[in-house]
Amino acid sequence: MPKPERKSYRGLAIRAKVSPVCRELCKSRIVEAVFRVLTAEDASFLADMTSAQSTSHQENSPKPAARILIAEDRPSMRRALGVLFALHKNWEVCGEAEDANEAIRKTQQLHPDLIVLDYKMHCSDGFQAANGILRALPDVPIVMFTLYKTDELERAANQIGIRRVIGKEEGVHTLLHAMEQLLPAT
């Protein structure tokens, strides 16, 4: 007859000690999701950025926030990018879109300062969205953030008027750097 298994409470004790620390670092499920999506390099970059932001918020007077529209078909990626952009002291997400038509419509309604656009979306693609967006607001910078970056895609995107194409494998630090370069100094 096998021995009855003895329940181990060691894991619960460790979790009880670590839990307050985790709660402090990850205040919401969305922030936890962002950290799961990030690479180790991105997480380090994000930690540096958030610590710098907390000290600079106290030193600087409030300035108008740059308005960013996120056009991405995956809700989890929209949320992760939204949380990430909100950590920047002078950025705000003014809207989200999940396909080309919604991206065009929201651009016309919201007049964002910058658009982060995925290439592959449901029933459409980023090129279709960019064409409509640039007809409505020809000067708005568009950054394509995609898993499908190739030299050919980048050339085609630049011909349409998309300012930068960042591969998701390059990491969010590359995306954030490109956005900082395209947005007016705030």
Image: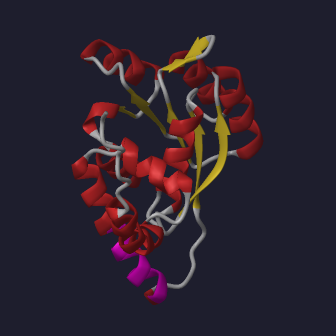
Is residue 19 found left or right of 39 in the rendered image?
Answer: right
Point out residue 175 in the picture as x, y percentages from the top left corner: 36, 44
Find the magenta span and give its range: 49-58
Residue positioned 36% across, 44% down in the render: 4
Point out residue 76 in the picture as x, y percentages from the top left corner: 54, 37
Residue sitting farthest toward the left: 41
Residue 172 appears in the figure: yes
The question of residue 54 being in magenta is answered with: yes
Point out residue 19 in the picture as x, y percentages from the top left corner: 43, 69
Is 186 drawn above or below residue 111 in the view shown? below
Instruction: Determine the image quadrant of residue 56.
Output: bottom left
Residue positioned 35% across, 19% down in the render: 148
Is 156 drawn above or below residue 178 in the view shown? above
Q: Nearer the viewer, residue 71 or 48?
A: 48
Q: Quadrant of the N terminus?
A: top left
Residue sitting farthest toward the bottom: 59
The question of residue 165 being in magenta is answered with: no
Q: Nearer the viewer, residue 69 or 9?
A: 9
Residue sitting farthest toward the front: 1
Q: Main secondary structure of the magenta part?
A: helix
Is 97 drawn above or below residue 82 in the view shown? above
Point out residue 63 in the picture as x, y percentages from the top left corner: 57, 74
Q: Nearer the viewer, residue 13 or 46?
A: 13
Residue positioned 47% across, 20% down in the render: 160
Q: Nearer the viewer, residue 5 or 46?
A: 5
Residue positioned 62% across, 29% down in the render: 133
